[in-house]
Image: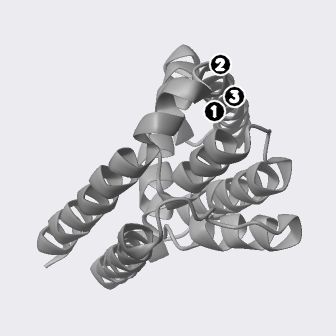
Amino acid sequence: MMVTLVILGFLSALTLGPAGFSIVQKLIQEKRWPWAEISGFFLGDFIYLGLSLLLLQSSLIQKASLKIGLTLATSLVLVLFSISMIRRETNQSPDSKTRRGFWRSLLLTLGNFHLVLIYTGLFTGVLNGNNQKLFQGAALYAISFALGFLLLLLVLLHFQATFQKLLRRIEILVGYSFIFFSFYLTWGAL
């Protein structure tokens, strides 16, 4: 099970949400590592990872109203992010100030409320009454996720010139994909 969590950590680093995609945008546009944004992203993700571990210890996660509320809130954030990305000017950076970049990245990650449900589902099989095993699995997942995301950014930076030419098209495609995904989530919640 632990090897599976490491593999899932690396693979889930490839699935970009709004915060991850904003980091990719900044990396490609500015040709530098946006460490403030990466820090905000990781902090938000680790907060949700910790929250999911706490929720696994309670019966609150079993409530359908919590699942529906988190899913609908995530859908709303996805739609708002998508609209802002689609409407943004072609060469406009998603965020040019480093300090604001940290907070923007943190808030975008925390706006992905659905992560709590994903993480609790992922770690339910690891629990089996063994808290030490659960925390070891969560730590392995977190480390492999962080390394996988940094590796993805390294590859994207290497091919930055190619992605720079296609970035606006990718932004539009991702924007509409997030809108579609938010409708899918909402439909599933209702």
Q: Pointer 2: what residue?
A: 158
Crowding at mark 3 (Cα within 10 Å: few <14, some 14-19, many 20+): many
Q: Where is residue 120 in the image (x, y as percent from the top left)?
A: 48, 54
Q: How far apart are marks 3 and 2 (CA)?
A: 27 Å
Q: Label 3's element?
A: helix
* Residue contact between numbered discs 1 and 2, judged by CB atoms under 8 Å: no
Crowding at mark 2 (Cα within 10 Å: few <14, some 14-19, many 20+): few
User: Given the current orientation, which residue lies at the most extreme right position?
Assistant: 99
Front of the two marks 3 and 1: 1
Residue depicted at x 35% and y 83%: 69
Marker disc for residue 149: 1
Residue depicted at x 41% and y 51%: 168
Q: In this view, does 188 lie to the left or right of 58?
A: left
- Looking at the image, is 90 positioned above or below residue 140? below
Residue depicted at x 55% and y 14%: 3
Crowding at mark 1 (Cα within 10 Å: few <14, some 14-19, many 20+): many
Task: Please identify the quarter of the rendering in which residue 170 is found.
Answer: top left
Amino acid type, mark 3:
Leu
Q: Pointer 3: what residue?
A: 140
